[in-house]
Image (cartoon, grey):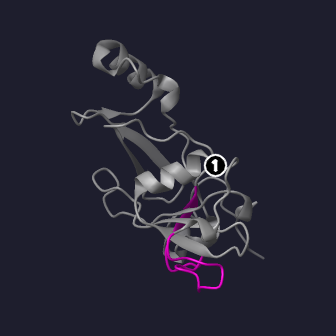
Amino acid sequence: MAKDSPKTPKTSSSRAATNPSVSVWAAQCEKCLKWRRIATQEEFEEIRSRFTEEPFNCHNQPNASCDDPADIEYDSSRTWAMDKPNLPKTPSGFKRELYLRRDYSKMDAYYFTPSGKKLRSFTEVTTFLQQNPEFSDVKPSDFSFTSPKVMDDTIPSTALLANSHKKGAASSTK
């Protein structure tokens, strides 16, 4: 259910291979259901990592109240994707980036090591950690390749038309 999980709005990227797709981090207040912009990815990951124990509330944010207008509205002016609650925070020194596929079918999660190496899977993470003992305090379970769900009702109609020839596309001929 939308109001029970932290939210991450995402926008599309024209070059998914080189540009991260997230332009705004946001979470929905469990009390007033208004969307609040979150200043950084790190702050968002902190909120997401403890969401079940500490649901997001306006009153926990500086200069925010349920009486204030929403910072951002859930609408089709941008493509939104919803992250799963309680995913681990990215380990210190690493960077997690999300990329929206050109066909809007899903987002892909990648990690970048402190040296800039791109990790695409748990196998690559495990291999990297085994080959780099200086990260002995980091565990493979500190990483999650779970991708946010792209919200169908915010996908641009031009993308839906372009993808209508793909699997499962409905045809209405009479």
Residue nearer the viewer, 84 or 53: 53
Q: Disc 1 on helix, strand or loop?
A: loop
Does the magenta run of residues contain 53?
Answer: no
Q: Residue at x 53, y 79 (%)?
A: 72
**Quadrant hosting residue 87:** top right
Indicate whether 157 appears above or below 40: below
Q: Position of residue 135 (x, y in %)?
A: 33, 21
Residue nearer the viewer, 60 or 74: 60
Dominant secondary structure (helix, strand or loop) of the stretch shown in magenta: loop
Q: Residue at x 52, y 36 (%)?
A: 144
Residue bearing the label numbered 1 = 85
Q: Residue at x 44, y 21 (%)?
A: 123
Q: Position of residue 91 (x, y in %)?
A: 41, 35
Name the quadrant of the C terminus.
bottom right
Task: Say left or right for 143 vs 92.
Answer: right
Q: Residue at x 45, y 44 (%)?
A: 109
Whether residue 159 is visible: yes
Instruction: Magenta stretch: give its range.
Output: 62-82
Q: Amino acid at mark 1?
A: Pro
Q: Position of residue 163 (x, y in %)?
A: 53, 63
Q: Residues within 10 Å of mark 1 (few under 14, many from 20)?
A: some
Residue nearer the viewer, 10 or 162: 10
